[in-house]
Amino acid sequence: MFSSHRSGIGKAVFVLLCLILTAAILTLSFLIYRTLSEPAEVTALRRLHVPEWVDVDLIRRDGASRRRTRLEALNAIVIHYIGNPGTSAQNNRNYFDNPDSTVSAHFIVGLEGEIIQCIPLHEKSSASNHRNRDTISIEVCHPDESGVFSPETYASLVRLTAWLCRECDLGADQIIRHYDITGKICPSWFVDDEAAWETFKQDVMTAKE
Ligand SMILES: [Zn+2]
């Protein structure tokens, strides 16, 4: 009776050890697979630290706004506008973080030129439709319905986009609008005024140097 009790405990310990070993092998295999299958530019993004003028305030991983999936590549930066005049970067960051929200962006540039990072650079945001897979997204706040950015906001947007282009080796043709993906009027200023859009890209390339 005593020995069968002991052998029962022995079996339980053996099964437990097997389970732990299996879990360890699966975890290790996943980590090796993830490392080997990750594009080099995404690994670089995983290791890249944002400048001190960016406020890192990541939203929660809820499977919708922040989907816990990494980028498949990095081919462009997508510029958006918030479309909700007068709201701050913090307002919109908190909206993304709301459990009911299914949208997000990597960065929000605010009315005073402040910048908040909401999604890690190597993860997908929920901003740019089928191009979420291979782009970094920037949402921009604006004071009124015209959609035109304030000088402070514009300056920060140029600075941030130039930093990304420099770090990720992207050119002017890899800065795109949401409009270029789906035809949506976003960002409205840069869709309404093609010359302002071209000037913006030139300003980014000048700041990138
Ligand atoms: Zn947009």
Image (cartoon, helix red, strand yellow):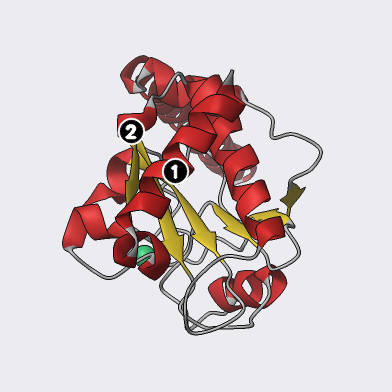
Q: Is residue 173 visible?
A: yes
Q: Residue at x 51, y 61 (%)?
A: 139
Q: Residue at x 48, y 64 (%)?
A: 104
Q: Quadrant of residue 73?
A: top left
Q: Residues within 10 Å of mark 1 (few under 14, many from 20)?
A: few
Q: Quadrant of the C terminus?
A: top right
Give the camera-side residue of 25 and 165.
165
Q: Nearer the viewer, mark 2 or mark 1?
A: 1
Question: Does residue 127 sit above or below 121 in this rendering?
Answer: below
Circle 2 — which element?
helix
Q: Residue at x 64, y 65 (%)?
A: 150
Residue 27 in percent (x, y) is at 46, 29
Give the camera-side residue of 36 and 195.
195
Question: Does residue 132 sit above or below 94 in this rendering?
Answer: above
Residue at which label 2 appears: 174
* N-term mark: 2 or 1: 2
Q: Residue at x 34, y 61 (%)?
A: 193
Residue type for callout 1:
Thr
Q: How many marks?
A: 2
Residue 199 has which mark?
A: 1
Residue 95 in percent (x, y) is at 58, 78
Give the left or right position of residue 55, taking residue 178 as reference.
Answer: right
Give the camera-side residue of 58 and 182.
182
Q: Is residue 24 visible?
A: no
Give the left or right position of residue 195, taking residue 149 as reference.
Answer: left
| Ligand 1 in which quarter | bottom left
Residue 40 in percent (x, y) is at 40, 15
